[in-house]
Amino acid sequence: MTSPVEGSRRTKTSEPSNRYSEGKRTAWLRPLRNSLAVRGMVYIMIYTNGHVNRKCQFPLAVCDRMVTAVMTTPHKLIDLSHTVAHGLITYKGLPAPIICDYLSREASRKHYAAGTEFQIGKIEMVANTGTYLDSPFHRYADGKDLSELDLQKLANLPAIKIPAQHQQAIDVSCLPRQADLAGKAVLIETGWSRHWNTSQYFEGHPFLTEDAARFLADSGAALVGIDSHNIDDVQDLRRPVHTILLRNGIPIVEHMTNLAALPPVDFRFFAVPVKVKGFGTFPVRAFAIV
Ligand SMILES: [Zn+2]
């Protein structure tokens, strides 16, 4: 018969009370964790750069806590979005958002009990504001609009960051030919976001070339993001990168920021817009979990 103490301990061991679900990265620890139920002492090999540096013996209780700690370590969230603000222009030639009260706190008081108030905001903006995502409908009348996008292509995507800080025209030679890009969010780090909210942001920005877009589409990338003013060269009125990626059903995220905070690989990417029918583009709160 199981005592209440044992029972509660077993429950705690098999179901860690972590705020995040157990990911692939820690799933391999589950057998070790389960083995602690029957073994009194456990050897743990400590790896550094792929080599066994130390082999330590720990009592069960200590080891159980260590494994639990590793499995439940919160992942770090990294914000990759610009702040949308009243009057702040994202794209040269398009209007800045107008942000105001629809119902002010003061005006709301008459609707509620004494001491209770709310604000209901109103925003007037073009779809291409802040850090935003383009769906195929942005380019093609018969392409999927925001409401038709598959969530699998927008959230929890395995991701890779491509460093491309030193050239304006980012061609296929800048992309990793050997890397497996299939099903991944490919984020191009140009560093151009440092010019956000300055006149420089609109002039001479980095962009992908047509051959780079074709390579990404052929590689099966799930989504392509960039921290620049436009993923295309604005001088090329054919907009070949939008044309190729969106024709292949690959959403594009533009005007990202903070890509320097990301590791090159081994992170997950999220960029989910509001589900608007008949709309091609919308701001997202783009972020990564590392
Ligand atoms: Zn775009």
Image (spheres, rainbow, N blue to C red):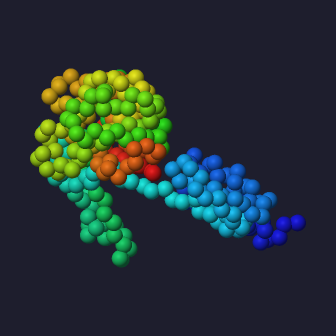
Residue 141 percent coordinates (x, y)? 31, 24
* Screen quadrant of the N terminus: bottom right
Residue 283 percent coordinates (x, y)? 31, 45
For residue 268, say whether it is visible: no
Residue at image location 28% in from the left, 67% down from the top: 105
Q: Is residue 87 left or right of residue 248?
A: left
Q: Is residue 283 left or right of residue 36?
A: left
Residue 60 percent coordinates (x, y)? 72, 65
- 63 or 124, nearer to the observer: 63
Residue at image location 37% in from the left, 41% down from the top: 161
- 160 or 252, nearer to the observer: 160
Counting the numbered discs, the total is 0
For residue 213, say whether it is visible: yes
Asked if 279 appears above or below 29 in the picture, the reply is above
- 3 or 189, nearer to the observer: 189
Residue at image location 26% in from the left, 64% down from the top: 104
Residue 64 percent coordinates (x, y)? 68, 63
Residue 18 falls in image quadrant: bottom right
Residue 248 falls in image quadrant: top left
Find the residue positioned furthest to the right.
1
Find the residue positioned furthest to the bottom.
114
Residue at image location 38% in from the left, 32% down from the top: 176
